[in-house]
Image (cartoon, rainbow, N blue to C red):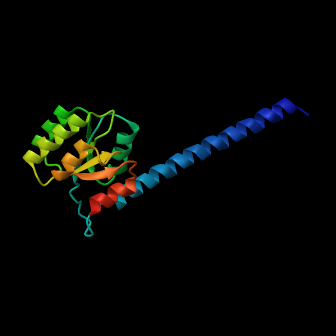
Amino acid sequence: MNFEHNRKTILEELNKRKRAHVIKRKVNSAKQRLMGERQHDSSNTDGTEKKRKKIMVFGKKSYFIRGIVEGLKNSYDVISFEDHEKACDFCINNSISYIFLDMDAPTDWKESTDLFTTTKMINNNVEMYLMTMDEYSTPVQTLVEKGGIVMKKPISVDELYNYLSE
């Protein structure tokens, strides 16, 4: 009996099964994402496409900002900026429904405040969400007085959808 030959054969078979399982899992994951996109606000009851609301997320690149963008992109047109001047230009030239501002480091709260005031001067109807760990800080409270809505971190995707559905 050739032990080494049997061992190689069994290992090859296990590797094939493992690869097949990984591929199957990736395919199922992709199918679920596609089904999720179809379920969230993609069409009216009569089958026509709904116009997707535009959301802007402002903050320095981080896992937190990436998570917000990924969580919302199935249901909304989401654009993310980390440069406040480009974000201001975008707000001036486009109609935005909601803006999420990161008020904590590494994002500079002064840039978030500048974007808030610039956008509110152009379109006072934009809903501005202030994402922060310290909801009682002076900059956050100043923006709340001007119409900002505080979202205390950490924020889950379900919480985002709850805020947006209100």
- Give the mark count: 0
Near-viewer residue (23 or 116): 116
The residue depicted at 19 percent of the width and 37 percent of the height is 87
- In the image, taking residue 145 as reference, residue 2 lies left or right, namely right
The residue depicted at 35 percent of the width and 50 percent of the height is 152
Identify the residue at the far bottom of this view: 46
Q: Position of residue 51 (x, y in %)?
A: 20, 57
Q: Position of residue 18 (x, y in %)?
A: 65, 42
Identify the residue at the far top of this view: 4
- In the image, taking residue 7 as reference, residue 47 lies left or right, namely left
Q: Is residue 127 visible from the viewing direction of this image?
A: no
Q: Position of residue 35 (x, y in %)?
A: 41, 57
Q: Quadrant of the C terminus?
A: bottom left
Q: Position of residue 126 (x, y in %)?
A: 16, 52
The residue depicted at 22 percent of the width and 54 percent of the height is 53
The residue depicted at 28 percent of the width and 58 percent of the height is 164
Near-viewer residue (87 or 113): 113
Near-viewer residue (47 or 53): 53
Near-viewer residue (16 or 141): 141
Q: Quadrant of the N terminus?
A: top right
Identify the residue at the far left of this view: 122
Q: Is residue 70 visible from the viewing direction of this image?
A: yes
